[in-house]
Amino acid sequence: MKNVAEEIKNSNFCIVLTGAGISTESGIPDFRSKDGIWNRYDINEYGYIQNFLENPEKIWKMLKDMILNMEKAEPNKAHYALAEMEKSGYIKAIITQNIDNLHKKAGSKNIIEFHGNFTKMKCMRCEREYEYNQIKLNDLPPKCECNGIIKPDIVFFGEEIPRDAFLKSFQLANKCDLFMIIGTSCEVYPASELPLIAKRRGAKIIEINQENTALTSVADYVLRGKAGIIMEQLLNEIKILQ
């Protein structure tokens, strides 16, 4: 733990990639565990943009379930620790695969939302933008005044990553000297490529997860356990080193 804290403190450009595992302590289920989203909703029936286009009412039932959960969720110790590390200058950016808005709620500033954010919505016909709290979820799928179907501004399988988020993330991966991965299995391309790019450029990799992942073998440091507990400990270690 102390060695990892020293790496963070002494790094010149540390970035972070977060996944669903960082938010489970906030009461938001991940996707691939036994209690995850894809265990309740078949990924092949609900996860692809084609599913949404063919049957938006069906997919919106899953989205409503997710949105109501994310709406009431609060950041946990891991989110707050990252926000404090960023404020202190130890972390330069957070790339998140999560759509739950919790990094923003915790006070982080330089966030790249790789897969979008559930709080933003857009009409698929006229492209009018909405905040999620402007949308009524009683009658699904929600519709715009133009009668177009409203879709959360999130990335389904089969959709492209927003160009700005994509470019910024890969620029950061090429620039960093320390790459911290928290709560992600790193199974979903192209986010899974980011740590590998950083590694090839000479950056050190820190993995924080409850179990082994596809990237465990290339990580320089591996910390096993809940993200909230580990991040709080790391923050305390960094403060001791100051």
Image (cartoon, grey):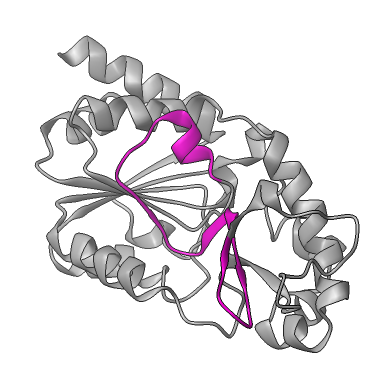
Residue reaching furthest top?
240
Q: Is residue 130 above or below residue 2?
A: below
In this picture, residue 19 sits left or right of residue 42:
left
Residue at 17 percent of width and 29 percent of height: 9
Q: Which quadrant of the rendered structure holds the N terminus?
A: top left
In this picture, residue 153 sits left or right of residue 78:
right
Which residues are the magenta region? 101-129
Q: Is residue 38 visible?
A: yes
Percent from the top left, x then y, of residue 179? 27, 51
Q: Is residue 170 above or below residue 119?
A: below
Percent from the top left, x then y, of residue 119? 59, 51
Percent from the top left, x then y, of residue 220? 28, 50
Percent from the top left, x then y, of residue 65? 82, 53
In this picture, residue 241 sits left or right of residue 16:
left
Residue at 87 percent of width and 74 percent of height: 57
Q: Is residue 29 magenta?
A: no
Q: How many numbered discs, if any?
A: 0
- Out of 242 and 92, give the one closest to the viewer: 92
- Out of 63 and 192, give the one closest to the viewer: 63
Q: Which quadrant of the rendered structure holds the C terminus?
A: top left
- Out of 149 and 33, give the one closest to the viewer: 149
Residue at 13 percent of width and 66 percent of height: 201
